[in-house]
Amino acid sequence: MAFTLKILSLALFLKNVVNSELPPIYSPQNFYLDFRFPENLENRRFEGSSKLHFVATDSVQELVVHAKVSEITTVDVWSTNNSIYGKHYYSESDGYLYISLLEELKRSSAYYLLVNFSAELRTDFTGFYIVPYLNEDMETEYMMSTKFKPNYARTAFPCLDSPKYESLLHLVVTHSAEFTAISNGLRDKVESIDNATVKTTFIPTPLISSYEISLSLIKFGSTKFLKNKIEYAVHGRNEDYNSFALNASILLLSKMYRYMETVYPQGKLDIVGVPTDMEITADDNLNMAVYPEGNIEFIESEQTVIEQIEVLIRIGRAIAHHYFGNHLTPASWTDLWLSDGFANWLAYKAVEETYHDFNVDQFYTVLEYQKALLIDGTEQSIPIRPSDNDDPSNEVPAHSPALSAKSACIVRMLENSFSENTFKEVLGSYASAPRIVTSEIFLKQFQAKTGLDLDLPGSWIYQSNYPLVTVDRSYADGTVLLTQTPFNAGDSTHKWWIPFDVISANNGTFQSSNMDGYLNPEWSIDLDAVNCSNTDWIILNSQLTGFFRTNYDAQNWKLIINALLEDHTLISANNRAQLLDDAFRLAEVGISSYELALNLSIYLKNETEFSPWGTTDKFFSALQWLLSDQKEQNLFRHYVREITEAPYNTMTLSEQMEDPPVLKAARGIVTYWACQAWNEDCFCRAKEIFRSYINNDVTIEPNIRETVLCTGIGVASRDELEKTWKKLFRSKNSVERHKTVFLLGCSQNEKFLIDFLERVFKADPPPDYYQHERKQVISKIIGRGKASVSAVMKFLQNATYPQILHEESVLLSTLNDISHFVFTRKDNQTFHNVIQGMLDSQFLSKGNYEALSQRVEKNLNSVRLYQDNILKWLRLFKERFPSNETETNGGKEPVCDIEPEPEIDCGCGCACEEDVASIILPEKLVYIVFLLLHFTLFV
């Protein structure tokens, strides 16, 4: 009874401080982990033992560790040879294993805690998970891997599941001989247990936290290279695609080694590709990283420049997490920005300095900087480091991939607030700090080397959102007034220390980011004359190092617009991109007008760089949905056709190997919108290439593949759509199949789309579509055009299919996806009928029904607020820039004179085998959804 009361007392104490850290009684030394997998994995069960060697830091008679495994079989605690274990209490739902001891621990004495357990492989890509996939013979195979960050290690084995607890890892894995085991450490030996089973033992790792432990068991091949006593390996099913990641690993590790001036600890770097098309989060850990296979595969002849950049950044991030994540380990989950932010920053820096011809800064602007501004610019924004008072939970961190992007931007801003040498001193001092780091440790190192008040970095680390800096010029005396307010943050009163620089038409250069001063949180700044006349523009944030948006007075905006129309190259490409991004965002939240943003966009008639077009791509997509009626679409097409005509004539639908990467990336965007706007040459050439592709297996250049296939599929006949289906889905590559479905959504043939969905969701899917792919199919095709939205809603009105979606737990996410693209009253009525049916069938709760209804009502409200003004501007634009030719075919698509091509007979009665490559970036739809959210969040 005494023991029971003691255990209950301890349990109640922990429950009263829910999600608190474990009692500070451990100084871990070694962690011995033994996994044992059966040959048959059908029930997903495995066994194991975890043994913790620790030094006691307090005299207590109870131990507590994290555990969420299926079963605890035995527990023991001893010092030297004497067991002091009493009893234990374990509840999986509670998440703790409580242990009562026969005697108190002796401070500074060494102990061992052994727990034998059984657990279950998960299927949600967290903890220790199992993944089914199809091999080349279309047979089901399995791989196993881990993702323990932030707090899933406890689901695989009992442990101290907090970043601050580090120990040497001794890992042993018993598994089927068909698998190869890969982990953080080098393999020491592989011993045969019997004909079907082996035991793999790994060399002990350096100090490592439980969340950094990685283990994968695979059956597919590897591409390896040994250089400077480091073995680099990329493991993936598609070995032809692995060489790029392997070479990038070698180059980027070398660059980071020279920059950080620290030694890479163990002689290996393993990168594992998980065979799935699910959008799972990457897992970067000591000496090892695990990604979805499509995130690390690249072959230049088949994939886009943007995909190439993204692969490089992922590889860079995997390596950088050695320095920021293992060498410097965050003390708690709330300090995770120190790992992810610095790793992202170092990855971009290494890629930029290694691949000079890519102009990586342009991709950084669109893919990282603008993404962070977009996601963080809402009332739902949270700090990159929540204060302990705001978020006492260390169980569920407030961090996310989105905040990783913001964290990298903050690090980059601090870097550019001083000279490069000063920041390297800060970094060097921080890197030599104790291994377990906190935000406070970083801030102290920052202050020691810069002499500045801690409020400067602290205002960015501990506060949510970011500022809008307003620039008001006094043209009478040449002074400039700078003020700050939180951007789109409701009633927030946050203020920041804002480093800034000012460039004018005749003073300063966009090649330098020398800081001119700080905007103090307590007052505005009156700058003296900025050495420019009243006819000269001024621009803040010349290298986009500051994490803020900027709004100018009306006259300065006019001067900027005139300068861009006269010679846009006088302003850097990235600043042109950010002027567009700020102007459209400010219009979306009602701070400035769409007239200003659209007037600014006219200069794009002469633009050929990627970052401005990458920015514009997102706004064109959002505007297209706001202007949903046919008449409105014709006005929008006229505007887009005029804007893209000159850039399209420069770029065309022809890619040259010697074209620089930024031109190839820009071509993909310009040609896409030129074809969507029915530019006759683009439209007809794309249709011609599409027909050659489906009939004669013509290869499409990767950066225009989306343009060609989306244009072709959009107007394809039913017969051509069926050929496309058969051709594209013959691929066994899950990544290619994943991307292919996006393009089928380009079809304007509503009947085909409904038939396609019915084929996929019938009880026995066709042999060319796999059961596990069904969960994402609707989210993939929706949003490419009005027909896809209408088709999905009609599909859901058949009572059979909501039942299937409900059983597969994707009905609510499907309805949420649809709600982002309902912008007309007709679609609203159809959507209301759909969700009412779901409510009546009890597939949908009343709360979710109301949330979906409100989401669509906000869409309609945004149409009411903005559409008339946008249409008024488009009409004036059409008067100012009438078409050089009669309006395209009376508001219909161009009529193309294309000679029919004979099909090549492969001897099998079908189109020849093709090499389908990456054809669309899923991130585009993510951006569209965020943009559409921004139209309504403030309403």
Image (cartoon, helix red, strand yellow):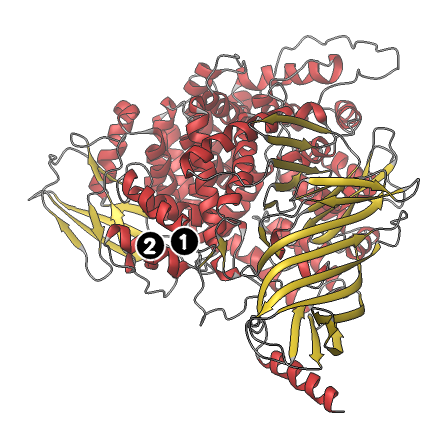
Residue at image location 33% in from the left, 39% down from the top: 544
Earlier-in-chain disc, 2 versus 1: 1
Residue 561, horizontal then vertical, whole percent: 27, 33
Viewport quadrant of the C terminus: bottom left
Depicted 318 relative to depicted 443: above or below: above
**Which amino acid, mark 2?**
Gln
Residue that badge 2 annotates: 445
At label 1, the amino acid type is Ala
Can residue 489 be spotted in the picture? Answer: no
Contact (Cβ within 8 Å) of mark 2 with mark 1: yes
Residue that mark 1 sits on: 433
In-image side of 97 versus 594 (left or right): right
Quadrant of residue 225 within the rendered picture: top right
Question: Is residue 32 something one can see in this rendering?
Answer: yes
Q: How far apart are marks 2 and 1 (CA)?
A: 9 Å
Q: How crowded is mark 1: few (under 14 residues within 10 Å), some or many (20 or more)?
A: some
Image quadrant of residue 647? top left
- Residue 277 in the image: state x and y as whole percent: 70, 39
